[in-house]
Image: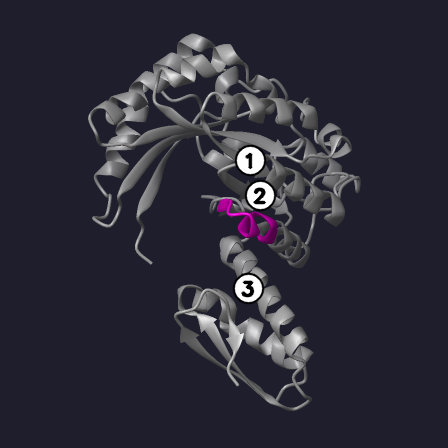
Amino acid sequence: MAKTQITIPVFVPHSGCRHSCVFCNQWKVSGSSGQPAVEDIEQTVKRYLSKVPPTVKRVEIAFFGGSFTGIEESKQQMFLRAAEGFVRMGLVHAIRLSTRPDCIDNEKLALLKEFSVETVELGVQSFDNSVLAAAGRGHTALDVYRAMELLKGCGFRTGIQLMPGLPGDTRERSIYSADEAVRLMPDDARIYPCVVLAGTRLEAMYRSGEFTPLDLEEAVDISAQMYSRFTANGISVIRIGLHPLENSSSVIDGPYHTAMGFMVKSRYRRNVLDSLLAEHKPGHGSVVNLAIPRSFCEEYIGLRRGNMDYLKSRYSLASIEYHAADTDRPFIIA
């Protein structure tokens, strides 16, 4: 499917962060070695703009990797002014940034309004206070509710980032976090299953046996349940899993996979088909003929037909036939 929107990432690793979370090593994730200069921002944006395909109708500049509103105000202005120049020229539509829930107040938001910032994403990670404490986040769930109220009151688009699999987290707590996020109705969501990165406190906890990360199957299953909550409520999940790392050896352990997004969406589609078959109650050894939505055909089929093979075995079917159709929901062809 051709891209209609792109986000140009500008990394400000660890900038403005008040705490060192146990899982975090933004130098590894971003591949950046320090704060960008104005020239770096301009060169990054120009490089991306030179490669924008004709199908793209919307371009954003996004500041990631730190707590943007925690950066000293003069540097915020410097970064934003560099990005806003492209907005004023009509080459970029808007600016987005990520920050901490406890780095939001009316004064900070007034500054963002001056510079064409449209979307503010909150690094929430969890709505369970015990999980937040174990991760060294330094904020509570109450900070998230307050920040979202302020952001929406000022007219910003909002995003929430969650991280299932943190120390002290459970399947139930992760799904609770997704449910709480839905209750706040952000415009976007990201799901980042926790991995153990080199050089973090989490690595030390892992090596001492204090922490065990989710395996890939657990992460896919939990993330699919979280994804289903967002999708059912019209909230766009714009990222699942870490972006592919330049050096994957920096991942010590945990559910890192370059195709995590597809795997989670495919599991979500499998669950939809599973519910459909459970309701239909196909007979042992029967043949099931499915019509599946054309737009999500590959996700329904699964990697190497994995979803179809799973359902065939689960329901002891002779075979599953499937056909792409112009439909929003799959159905069984009589």
Q: Is residue 170 above or below residue 85?
A: below
Check residue 242 for magenta coloring.
Answer: no
Given the image, on which type of amino acid does mark 3 rest? Arg
- Dot 2 alpha-carbon crowd within 10 angstroms: few under 14, some 14 to 19, many 20 or more: many
Rendered image quadrant of residue 202 = top right
Q: Which mark is residue 104?
A: none
Q: Percent x, y for residue 127?
A: 69, 34
Residue carrying label 2: 192
At numbered mark 2, what does the secondary structure look like: helix, strand or loop? Answer: loop
Residue designated by label 3: 269
* Mark 2 or 1: the one toward you: 1
Task: Residue 129: tell me if it is visible.
Answer: yes
Q: In this view, does 87 lie to the left or right of 132?
A: left
Residue stretch rendered in magenta on the structure:
228-237
Could you say where residue 175 lies in the image, as x and y percent from the top left?
A: 69, 47
Using the rendered view, name the quadrant where residue 210 is placed.
Answer: top right
Left-right relation of 202 to 162: right
Q: Mark 1 points at which residue?
A: 160
Q: Where is residue 304 in the image (x, y as percent from the top left)?
A: 50, 73
Q: Which of 306 and 117 is in front in this view?
A: 117
Query: Which of the two labelled residues, at mark 3 and mark 1, occupies the earlier sequence position?
Result: 1
Q: Which sits in the foreground, 112 or 12?
A: 112
Marked residue nearer the N-terminal end (3 or 2): 2
> Alpha-carbon distance for marks 3 and 2?
19 Å
Q: What residue type is labelled 1?
A: Ile
**Mark 3, secondary structure of its residue:** helix
Q: Residue at x 33, y 42 (%)?
A: 6
Q: Distance between the residues labelled 2 and 1?
A: 11 Å
Residue 107 image offset from top left, x and y in percent:
49, 10
Q: Label 1 near label 2: C-beta < 8 Å? A: no
